Amino acid sequence: MRLIITDKNVGHLAAFFVKERMAAAKPTENKNFVLGLPTGSTAIDMYKSLIELYRRKEIYFDNVTTFNLDEYVGLPEDDKESYHTFMYENFFKYIKIDKKKINIPNGNAPDLIKEGEEYEEKIAKAGGLDLFIGGLGENGHVAFNEPYSSLSSITRDKQLDKNTIIANSRFFGNDPTKVPKTAMTMGMQTILNAKEVLLLVTGEKKALALKHLVEGAISHAWPATVLQMHRKLVVIVDEASCNELTLKTYRYFKRLKDEFSHIYA
Ligand code: GLP
């Protein structure tokens, strides 16, 4: 695991990270770069920066295929809080990308198990995820893999945890009863299968989840901890989210050479 603790904008840094990884992969029409894309407040700054890079002609999405991590079950695709709408409004409408290469789980599929299996097949057919980008829930979820999710789960429907429903009610007029109770989500195994994983974490509210991710034992009680097993995990965090880390851990990562310093220039 590589923890990058920054006092700069986490989303901005993440966008440059994506740009560098895409440039290094040199994607072509036949071998697209395959991205796993998140929603959530933390991701918004990254999308803003990616759009800015696109406008400056520093990044292109012609040879890119995307797979979103999750979507609510039962919410119409055009609902203003659906992740379909989120992605269009915050990212896709600003860039040139072939609609056929955009994949988002269908939360209205008649058979959600089948939908999950087919989603996995599509990811495999695309060559697997080159870079999975995700946030971290206050309860340690990644995508919608809530506490006690199977650590070898694949894309499926998942009941949302009460904490997640409360956290996400801010998008539903602060009314938890309006938040869908179930979501389709990539599984922890789907994420482990990605060639590289990038997590973005900001704010004091995530401090306990970050502590578990970095210092805790692997446990389904905090699903993100299984990512300790991933060979290429990068976690970009702000100072506030480090509040629960031990000084030893904090200093260890702060001391490492900052390989991203060229990005700030
Ligand atoms: C949401 C999403 C996750 C997201 C997380 C954190 O419920 N399903 O994919 O990473 O919770 O969201 P935020 O960045 O808004 O704190």
Image (cartoon, rainbow, N blue to C red):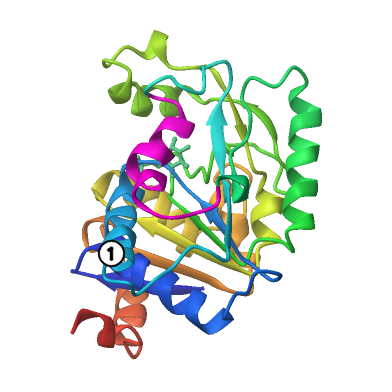
Residue 69 % position (x, y): 56, 44
Q: Would you place residue 205 above or below residue 78 in this image?
A: below
Residue 134 % position (x, y): 48, 53
The residue positioned 64% from the left and 55% from the top of the image is: 191
User: Which quadrant of the figure has residue 226?
Assistant: bottom right
The residue positioned 56% from the left and 55% from the top of the image is: 225
| Furthest residue in direction bottom, as rendered | 257
| Furthest residue in direction top, as rendered | 177
Residue bounds of the magenta highlight: 81-98
The residue positioned 65% from the left and 61% from the top of the image is: 129
The crowd level at tag 1 (other Cα within 10 Å; few <14, some 14-19, many 20+) is few
Residue 22 can be seen in this image: yes
Residue 224 is a magenta residue: no
Label 1 sits on a secondary structure element that is: helix
Q: How would you classify the magenta stretch by its main secondary structure?
A: helix
Q: Which residue is mark 1?
A: 55
Residue 152 can be seen in this image: no
Q: Would you place residue 113 above or below residue 18 in this image?
A: above
The residue positioned 35% from the left and 66% from the top of the image is: 15
Image-based side of 79 in relation to 102, left or right: left
User: Which quadrant of the figure has residue 138?
Assistant: top left
Image-based side of 196 in relation to 263, left or right: right
Residue 88 is a magenta residue: yes
